Amino acid sequence: MTDTLQNAVLAALRDPAHRISSAWLYDQRGSALFEAITQLPSYYPTRTEIDILDTHLPEITAAIPGHTLVVELGSGSSRKTVPLLNSLHQPAGYVPLDISADYLADAADGLSAQFPGLPVLPRVADFTSAFDLPADLPEHGSRLGFFPGSTIGNLDTGNARDLLRHCRMLLGGDSRFLVGIDLDKSPDILIPAYDDPEGVTAAFNRNLLVRINRELGADFDPDDFRHEARYFEAPARIEMHLVCERAITIHVAGERFELTAGESLHTETSRKYNIEAFSTLAAGAGWSVSGHWIDARGRFAVMLMHA
Ligand code: AVI
């Protein structure tokens, strides 16, 4: 993601796997469509994680020392952050990190208004490469990383491990890390979550082509592409694809590409973990699991780890 959209698209079109980072799905309209996805009846992760936090936050935060500095990866919806800050014992400050400066500013303003005495220090950060904390942190005890939403599932195993390792280094010796992960389950539940009958996820996926046309002057016709969600067992994951429905020629940044009917652009991977696989991944990055909380239907887990 440190790359440009043009480099990412050209590389994806030149390579037979046609894979492009899902981070490019989030322009302004993509972010709004993702928000709409989180409200869909078939997209269970957001709702389920909120239920787990609503039910178990007192228990979770009892294991976290007071005066902690909260560092959130992705400036979260206040629906998750506000209850966490309310439940912690005298948090020392809140550091929201996000790749989008606009989202960050909104998140920081909202939180500052709700917690007038709490230092809020937003910082633009790209999780796919090394990032830093602000230099002017308030005085604090230990640090708590918060990475809800199962966004870690959108990273390949190697990148997820690198991110966990980097956070271990940034958060330091006495830190904790609270991470939301989506659990592997029947494709009967997973496929509709990523291919909803309302067509919002299809619009979210196809919006990438609209963005490429707008920002790179390309000539994709989004109607030539069908949204597809594919389930794979090992490692368990959903892949989103844009499948080309007829042979086409497209032009991007002065280059010409042919796509045949049935070829697809692979636009997102969403890993589905189990507790053991995630704990092993975390251990390889210096984190030990202190507890985990799962909803009654076994769909989603909130993992608490310590350094
Ligand atoms: C942001 N991320 C955790 C979502 C997911 O479930 O992988 C993105 C998403 N893609 C399609 N629907 C939602």
Image: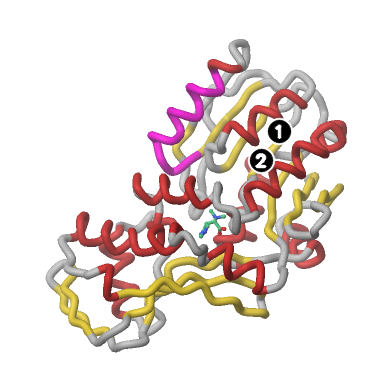
- Asked if the beta carbon under badge 2 is closer than 8 A to the nearest atom of ligand 1, the reply is no
Q: Is residue 283 above or below residue 120?
A: below
Q: Main secondary structure of the magenta part?
A: helix
Q: Amino acid at mark 2?
A: Phe
66 or 129, which is in the foreground?
66
Give the residue at x 74% y 43%: 51
Q: Is residue 267 above or below residue 119?
A: below
Q: Residues within 10 Å of mark 1 (few under 14, many from 20)?
A: many
Label 2 sits on residue: 146
248 or 142, which is in the foreground?
248
Distance between mark 2 and mark 1 Cα atoms = 10 Å
Say which quarter of the image contains residue 262: bottom left
Does residue 102 show up magenta in the picture?
yes
Give the residue at x 41% y 45%: 32
Quarter of the C terminus within the rendering: top right
Give the residue at x 83% y 54%: 296
Q: Amino acid at mark 1?
A: Arg
Q: Is residue 97 above or below residue 90?
A: below
Does residue 184 show up magenta in the picture?
no
Q: Which residues are magenta?
A: 98-112
Q: Is residue 13 visible?
A: yes
The colour scheme used here is secondary structure
Q: Which mark is residue 143?
A: 1
Q: Is residue 130 above or below residue 256?
A: above
Q: Position of residue 276 (x, y in %)?
A: 81, 65
Q: Which mark is residue 254?
A: none
Say which quarter of the image contains residue 224: bottom left
Q: Position of residue 21 (x, y in %)?
A: 43, 63
Give the residue at x 71% y 57%: 285
185 or 214, which is in the foreground?
185
Q: Nearer the viewer, mark 2 or mark 1?
A: 2
